[in-house]
Image (tube, rainbow, N blue to C red):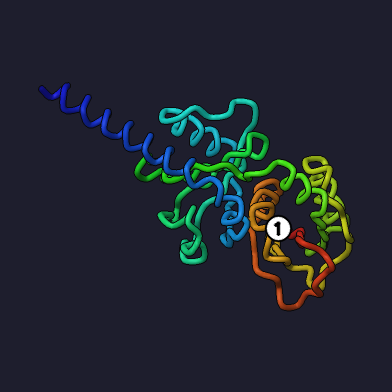
């Protein structure tokens, strides 16, 4: 009898997860537009954390096995609550972005529950056009020479289609960490992926800096 109860409970959980996935796919046509307005600070994730989440989520669904996803943590759900994809998000939820397979997964570790699933974009040509026109400026916000150039090199190695607008020193040299600023307000998903790549966080534009003619500004900190 106990075994049957556990079996039924597990079956209900699996069915619930399947329903969530179906609903997510049904709303996929809206996701790219919604995801581009993501305004939260993704925390740089360790390889151990990423692999742990992949193992957990892999118990519920088939994950891409040809890439390691970028990982962001929802820190302030109020900033994204008006976006349908994140309407059920809670602080502490994890966002896994598979940029090659164009898939995003919102997962709640505390409940071991998939909250939402959707593709990163709905039109490959539109995504490619977006990549080709993305302009990035790099500021060195530390006292260590060459940090902005190092960051630029790392980004270009991963995203060869992104163009560099300028590489120069920031107005301040005491930034404690790497920052990624979505200047245009239309590239939040790219900003989140860049922040995960360089081990930084998405931030508002610093008041003491001069705004470059770019879509995204990356400031290299200490």
Which quadrant would residue 180 be assigned to in this image? bottom right
Q: Position of residue 15 (x, y in %)?
A: 32, 33
The residue lying at 74 percent from left, 60 percent from top is 221
Q: Nearer the viewer, residue 212 or 51?
A: 212
Which residue shows up at 47% across the image and 56% down it?
84
On the image, the x and y values in percent for residue 166 come to: 89, 61
Q: Count numbered badges in the picture.
A: 1
Q: Residues within 10 Å of mark 1 (few under 14, many from 20)?
A: many
Q: Nearer the viewer, residue 72 or 121?
A: 121
Name the quadrant containing residue 67: top right
Location of residue 39 with respect to 163 vertically, above or below = below
- Residue to which mark 1 is pinned: 178
Image spot of residue 24 (x, y percent): 46, 43
Residue at left offset 30%, top offset 34%: 13
Q: Left or right: 154 with respect to 44?
A: right
Quadrant where the image shows the C terminus:
bottom right
Q: Is residue 8 left or right of residue 101?
A: left
Label 1: which secondary element = loop
- Residue 74 appears in the picture as rendered: yes
Residue 95 x/y as whole percent: 53, 47
Which quarter of the figure is the N terminus placed in?
top left
């Amino acid at each position: 009898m106990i075994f049957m109860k556990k079996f039924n409970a597990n079956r209900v959980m699996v069915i619930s997860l399947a329903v969530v996935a179906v609903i997510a796919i049904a709303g996929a046509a809206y996701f790219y537009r919604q995801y581009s307005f993501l305004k939260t600070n993704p925390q740089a994730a360790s390889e151990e954390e990423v692999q742990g989440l992949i193992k957990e989520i892999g118990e519920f669904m088939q994950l891409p096995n040809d890439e390691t996803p970028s990982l962001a943590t929802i820190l302030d759900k109020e900033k994204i609550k008006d976006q349908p994809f994140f309407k059920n998000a809670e602080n502490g939820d994890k966002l896994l972005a598979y940029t090659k397979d164009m898939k995003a997964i919102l997962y709640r570790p505390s409940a071991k529950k998939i909250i939402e699933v959707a593709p990163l974009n709905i039109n490959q040509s539109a995504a490619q056009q977006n990549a080709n026109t993305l302009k990035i400026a790099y500021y060195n916000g530390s006292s260590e020479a060459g940090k902005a150039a190092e960051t630029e090199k790392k980004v270009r190695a991963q995203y060869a289609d992104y163009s560099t607008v300028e590489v120069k020193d920031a107005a301040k040299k005491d930034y404690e960490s790497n920052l990624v600023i979505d200047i245009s307000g239309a590239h939040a998903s790219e900003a989140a992926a860049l922040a995960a790549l360089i081990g930084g966080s998405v931030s508002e534009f610093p008041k003491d800096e001069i705004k470059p003619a770019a879509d995204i500004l990356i400031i290299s900190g200490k």
